[in-house]
Image: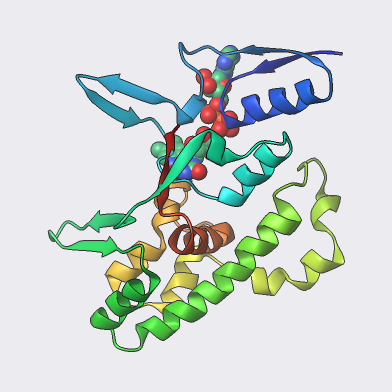
């Protein structure tokens, strides 16, 4: 069959790749001069700006995609561990740097608020569960029917996944320190719906876990 794919972001390019793999004839259209969608770059006066993503989140998703084509991301780009992974500069000229060494992250929390490293560990334990549940049970569903989420497994984990709780309140349960609260909510700054003040962001807990434990890295093309 012949297919037309509109857009060359991650979604368009991966759709086109899977369709072509199945033997279809695929044509891809892009309105911009370069491909990549939000993941493209803008270069000016010797500077390169990421137009969207900078962090290599969810490496497992990329690994799976490449594996489906008998390829390996390592053959296309190197992943370079960032240290610090990121830093937040607060208006009070206070900077919080997140080390790539997990022990240093725990020590940082402890230095601000005694006992908070233990809270961080339990926050991350919850986050790990949510991330793995999301990746293994939800992410690869096509998203066309409510039936996909009406499974016994999902329903029985609704409270553990905290689907009906705001992420802001979830973070507040663990950390009182405003800097930590900001740090653990970093994924929201990037993806949140700016029109809503306190929506439900169950997935961000998982993203924070993934980002902090695994992928404070960026890709450099080989
Ligand atoms: C500021 C910012 C920071 C981010 N940071 C991260 C990060 O650190 N890590 C991460 O994993 N993700 C990050 N994201 C999210 C990530 O960039 C997006 O999830 C992803 O790029 C979306 O890909 P997509 O293919 O769905 O859409 P898009 O990338 O938006 O692709 C859509 C494409 O369709 C094209 N198009 C639209 N209409 C037409 C038309 N009529 N004809 C032809 N072409 C058309 C567009 O030009 C575009 O190229 C960030 C996003 C933003 C905005």
Q: In this view of the protein, which residue sits in the foreground, 41 or 82?
A: 82
The one of 43 and 37 positioned closer to us in this rendering: 43
Q: Is residue 97 left or right of residue 219?
A: left
Residue 86 in the image: state x and y as whole percent. 31, 54
Q: Nearer the viewer, residue 89 or 217?
A: 217
- In the rendered image, which quarter is residue 216 located in? bottom left
- Is residue 194 visible in this depiction of the protein? no
**Along the line of sight, the residue nearer the viewer: 20 or 194:** 20
Find residue 154 and report its horizontal and vertical position in percent.
78, 65
Q: Is residue 98 visible?
A: yes
Report the residue that reaches farthest toward the bottom.
Answer: 115
Where is 147 relative to 45, above or below? below
Q: Position of residue 85 (x, y in %)?
A: 34, 56
Please tell me whether residue 174 is drawn above or below residue 213 in the rendered image. below
The answer to whether 30 is drawn above or below residue 100 in the figure is above
Residue at 56% in and 49% down: 59
């Amino acid at each position: 069959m012949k297919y037309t794919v509109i857009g060359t972001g991650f979604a368009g390019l991966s759709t086109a790749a899977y369709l072509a793999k199945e033997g279809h004839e695929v044509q891809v259209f892009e309105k911009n001069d370069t491909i990549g969608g939000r993941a493209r770059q803008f270069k000016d006066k010797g500077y390169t700006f990421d137009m969207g993503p900078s962090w290599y989140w969810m490496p497992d998703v990329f690994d799976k995609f490449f594996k489906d084509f008998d390829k390996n991301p390592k053959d296309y780009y190197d992943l370079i561990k960032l240290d610090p992974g990121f830093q937040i500069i607060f208006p009070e000229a206070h900077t919080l740097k997140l080390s790539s060494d997990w022990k240093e992250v725990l020590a940082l929390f402890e230095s601000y608020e005694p006992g908070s490293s233990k809270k961080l560990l339990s926050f991350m334990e919850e986050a790990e569960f949510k991330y793995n549940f999301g990746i293994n049970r939800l992410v690869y569903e096509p998203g066309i029917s409510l039936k996909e989420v009406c499974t016994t497994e999902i329903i029985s984990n609704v409270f553990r996944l905290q689907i009906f709780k705001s992420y802001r309140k979830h973070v507040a349960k663990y950390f009182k320190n405003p800097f930590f609260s900001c740090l653990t909510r970093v994924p929201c700054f990037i993806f949140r719906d700016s029109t809503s003040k306190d929506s439900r962001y169950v997935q961000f807990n998982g993203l924070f876990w993934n980002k902090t434990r695994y992928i404070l890295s960026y890709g450099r093309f080989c």
